[in-house]
Image (cartoon, rainbow, N blue to C red):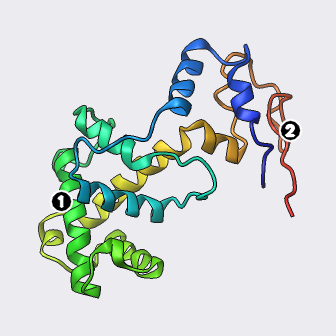
C-alpha cells in the first residue's frame, strides 16, 4: 500500500505531536549523511553494502543513513540497550562480524562481499543468519547472534525515521491525542489513507 507523500511530515508539525517527539523526528529528517568516524573507510563501505541488502531503499528517494547511524553510535561509545552475554562489546562485535563476512565471501566466492552479485550477497548473509558460514571468525564468534544484532539495529534505525514511517502510514508519533478508533480497519482522522498506485 502506498500513502500520500508528505502526510507524516505534515503531521509532525501539528499540535498532535509533543514538542519532544517533534524535535527528535525533525532532527532525523534534517540529519546529514554521516561520514565514518568509528569504522575504516573499507569497513564502512562494507557495512553500507550489507545494510542495503538487509533493507533495500529506493535509489530515487532520500536514503535513510543506516550505516552512518550505526557508525555514529559506536563512535559515541553508546549502547543500543542490549547485547547477548556471549557477545563482545558492540564495537568489537561489528568489526569482527564485518571481517567475518568478507572472510566468508573469499572462501565461498573468492571475492570481497561488495563485489558479489545481489543473489550471492543474499546467499552469503543467509549462511551467516543460519550459523553455517565457513571461516575461522565464526568458530569463536556466533554468526547468528551477530546477524540478529545487526538486523535489529538496522531495522530500528530505518523504521524510527519519519520517511520510513511515512512509507508505511505510521502515525504513532502523534502522541498528544488518545486513540479512540481501535476496531479492525478503523482509522483516526490523523491516520493517512492508502492510495492505489498503478
Q: Please report contact status of discs 1 and 2: CB closer than 8 Å, yes or no.
A: no
- Vertical placement of residue 49 versus 35, above or below: below
Measured from the top left, where is residue 89 in percent x and y? 17, 44
Q: Residue at x 22, y 33 (%)?
A: 77
Judge whether residue 87 can be spotted in this image.
no
| Relative side of 122 to 12, left or right | left
* Residue 96, label in figure: 1
For this rendering, which residue is in front, 87 or 151?
A: 151
The answer to which image quadrant residue 185 occupies is: top right
Q: Which residue is mark 2?
A: 186
Describe the element under mark 1 as helix, strand or loop: helix
Q: Residue at x 62, y 14 (%)?
A: 18
Inter-mark Cα distance, 1 to 2: 47 Å
Q: Which mark is residue 82?
A: none
Mark 2: give few (<14), some (14-19) or many (20+) Cα within 10 Å: few
Instruction: Give how far across and how far down residue 21 sits, in percent.
Output: 57, 20
Mark positioned earlier in the residue sequence (1 or 2) = 1
Q: Give the image location of residue 87, x and y in percent.
A: 19, 52
Amino acid at each position: 500500500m502506498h500513502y500520500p507523500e508528505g502526510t507524516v511530515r505534515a503531521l509532525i508539525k501539528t499540535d498532535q505531536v509533543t514538542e519532544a517527539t517533534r524535535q527528535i523526528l525533525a532532527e532525523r529528517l534534517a540529519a546529514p549523511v554521516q561520514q565514518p568516524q568509528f569504522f575504516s573507510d573499507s569497513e564502512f563501505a562494507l557495512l553500507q553494502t550489507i545494510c542495503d541488502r538487509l533493507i533495500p531503499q529506493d535509489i530515487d528517494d532520500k536514503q535513510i543513513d543506516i550505516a552512518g547511524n550505526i557508525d555514529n553510535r559506536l563512535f559515541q561509545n553508546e549502547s543500543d540497550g542490549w547485547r547477548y552475554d556471549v557477545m563482545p562489546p558492540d564495537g568489537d562485535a561489528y568489526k569482527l562480524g564485518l571481517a567475518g563476512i568478507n572472510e566468508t565471501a573469499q572462501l565461498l566466492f573468492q571475492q570481497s562481499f561488495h563485489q558479489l552479485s545481489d543473489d550471492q550477497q543474499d546467499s552469503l548473509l543467509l549462511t551467516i543468519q543460519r550459523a553455517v558460514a565457513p571461516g575461522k571468525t565464526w568458530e569463536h564468534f556466533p554468526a547468528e547472534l551477530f546477524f540478529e544484532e545487526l538486523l535489529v539495529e538496522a531495522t530500528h534505525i530505518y523504521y524510527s525515521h519519519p520517511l520510513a514511517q511515512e512509507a508505511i502510514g505510521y502515525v504513532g508519533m502523534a502522541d498528544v491525542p488518545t486513540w479512540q478508533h481501535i476496531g479492525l480497519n478503523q482509522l483516526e482522522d490523523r491516520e493517512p489513507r492508502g492510495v492505489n498506485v498503478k
